[in-house]
Amino acid sequence: MPKKLAFWQGNMAIAMGGIAAGCRFFGGYPITPSSEIAEVMAEELPKINGRFIQMEDEIGGIAATIGASIAGYKAMTATSGPGFSLKQENLGLAYMAEIPIVVIDVMRGGPSTGLPTRVSQQDVMQARWGTHGDHGTIAYAPSSVQECFELTIDAFNMAERFRQPVLVMSDEVIGHMREKVVIPEPGSYPIVDRKRPKVSPEEFVPYLADPADDVPAMASFGDGYRWHVTGLTHNDYGFPTNEPEEIGKKHLRLVRKVERFRDEIVKYDLEQTEGAEILVVSYGCVARSAVRAVREARAKGIRVGHFRPITLWPFPDKELIQAAGQAKKVIVPELNCGQMISEVKIALGCKAEIIPSNLVNGEILRPHEILATIEEVA
Amino acid sequence: MPREEIKPWLRTRFFPHIWCPGCGHGIILHAILRSLVDLGKTREETVIASGIGCSSRMPGYINANTVHTTHGRSLAFATGIKLAKPELTVIDVMGDGDCTAIGGNHFIHACRRNIDITAIVMNNNIYGMTGGQASPTTPVGARATTAPYGAIDTPFDICRLAEGAGASYVARATIAQPALCEQYIKKAIQKKGFSVVEIITHCHTQFGRKNKRPNPVDNLIFFKENSIPKAKAKEMTEEEKKGKIVIGEFVDREGLEYTEAYLKLIERVRG
């Protein structure tokens, strides 16, 4: 059977990846450079009996998305910088109430309105700590249109498995670039659905987690189980609590359910790291330039490799330490003033020199610029 | 005491409730539950949504599908639930600050969209839970902790706001008329489209203490003495209506309901 091919924009691939994962609800608000995701969803979802709604603001977009998930739908929203800031409070509610949703952030330049049409990687720390309070974070950074499709499927699978929001941190370059996509046959990739209650409605305890994975089964509004959803810290019955024991139990579980399965969540990619004396660490659109620079440097005889975190959160620190091997110099090119570099420093700071290479003028880092940095430190 | 048939709708295991003794919210809770029971609704098909505030704690006490969301945003959550499953009966309970201040945008757009949700706005003219700060419905001259010299800004008329924004059913009553509250809530739930029932209630703890109505009974008497039916209000001058509460049904119209329109769109697209 011939492979099904498409020539898609990154934003289109995210929308189609969501649909392939079973997404049947999209709540959103127009914002550059992510609007194409909403536009594709508006067109495609009614064709498959899904629901699209353009809400009155960014906050409403994520609220409706969470509401749809409570009613049993796989649901997502998409936004960019300022909209990602606006969504943070309700993102926190989804963490606290353990409602699976997928949130796409197509990163543009900030702070504030910043650069609506130009690329940056300035939201990667906001992805981790944007909403107030502790929680485990799962965030992917696609480097290609193919990955936009595949990682959006992964994002839904992880959201359903761990009952929490999962983020796809795309960027303006990846979102608007067009590339070939190989569309996998439905059934050829795993699809995860949230655990449903196995007990009767009378016996159902909505936040009683299975010790095997720290994730409680989830009922949907309308399917016969009555339960209470709240952003207040709650006990196993879902009801607000001020009991220190119950508070601590809930809080720690929100963090632990991701930490426990970190090895299964983490994704990364390597390029010629064997025997590397210099390591370049980059993600998203920058990794495309960095990998090319590394190949050119290798051709010139420089022993350099590349490490690409695909999950920004959890950060693949153990894998980075292993890949770095004996490298004494680590270059971290980013389209911000140095955000993920702190994670690299935590992992490698005591055994290698960590060298930032930042660009925040709305442009992308080009291969020759990264090559120049490699040659400079070699 | 609640009627026998109301009791299965209460999560009594979560009592005592957080409301002050004498709070009007209990009267409204009872009116909502009587309406649901009389309309033959089941707990399984009923969703109660809320935002933040004293009134927004109500869903916790109702044994249905309940969701206590973020401040002002409950209508946006409820919109997602209703569009996902239009067969559910969705009621959104809000306070005046939740609905008309932080949630004002969601409120007018829910009215405009005419989605089949019933909004019950419990208007006590104050932020009660946070300690008595002024709200968008605090009357001019009334005192609040953030208006220690009296409020100077013009309050919202929630019913006129809902009417102007496009709601299909709009009515107002006070907790001194519990049977009327029930009658309006029932009509609102039955209405296909967005419905708003504003129920004037009191916060004797936070509003009353500062405004010469410190006891629950003072407030009930005040509501009884100052409520005037819509028909009578028409014959009164603006000066005569000052300080009065106009009660009645202000809007009862048929319009295109959002989820129905969306399901038709799906049919059209799918051929």
Image (spheres, rainbow, N blue to C red):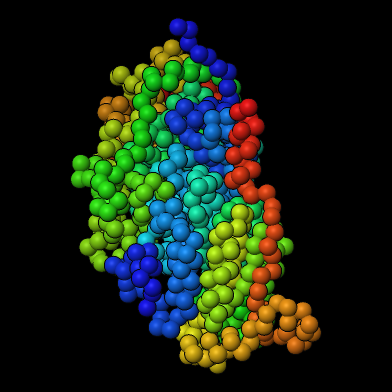
Quadrant of the image occupied by residue B227: bottom right
Q: Quadrant where the N terminus of chain A lies? A: top left
Residue B232 placement (x, y as % from top left): 73, 82
Residue A223 seen in render? yes
Q: Residue at x 64, y 49 (%)?
A: B257
Q: Nearer the viewer, residue A217 or A160?
A: A217
Question: How many dots with numbers?
Answer: 0
Whether residue A257 is visible:
no
- Location of the C terminus of chain A by quadrant is top left
Residue B97: x, y in percent?
56, 70
Compare residues A101 and B229 and report the one nearer the observer: B229
| Relative horizontal placement of residue A228, taking residue B246 as reference (left or right) | left
Q: Position of residue A345 (x, y in %)?
A: 35, 40
Please report the residue visible at 53 percent of the width from the left and 47 percent of the height from the top. Answer: B86
Residue A167 position by quadrant: top left
In this rendering, would A185 be left or right of A6? left
Residue at the farthest left position: A211
Left or right position of A262 against A156: left
Which of the 4 image quadrants contains residue A73?
Answer: top left
Residue found 57% across the figure and 58% down from its top: B190
In the displayed structure, A78 sits above or below A273; it is below
Residue A234 on image: x %, y %: 32, 60
Q: Is residue A132 above or below residue A109?
A: below
Q: Residue at x 22, y 63 (%)?
A: A245
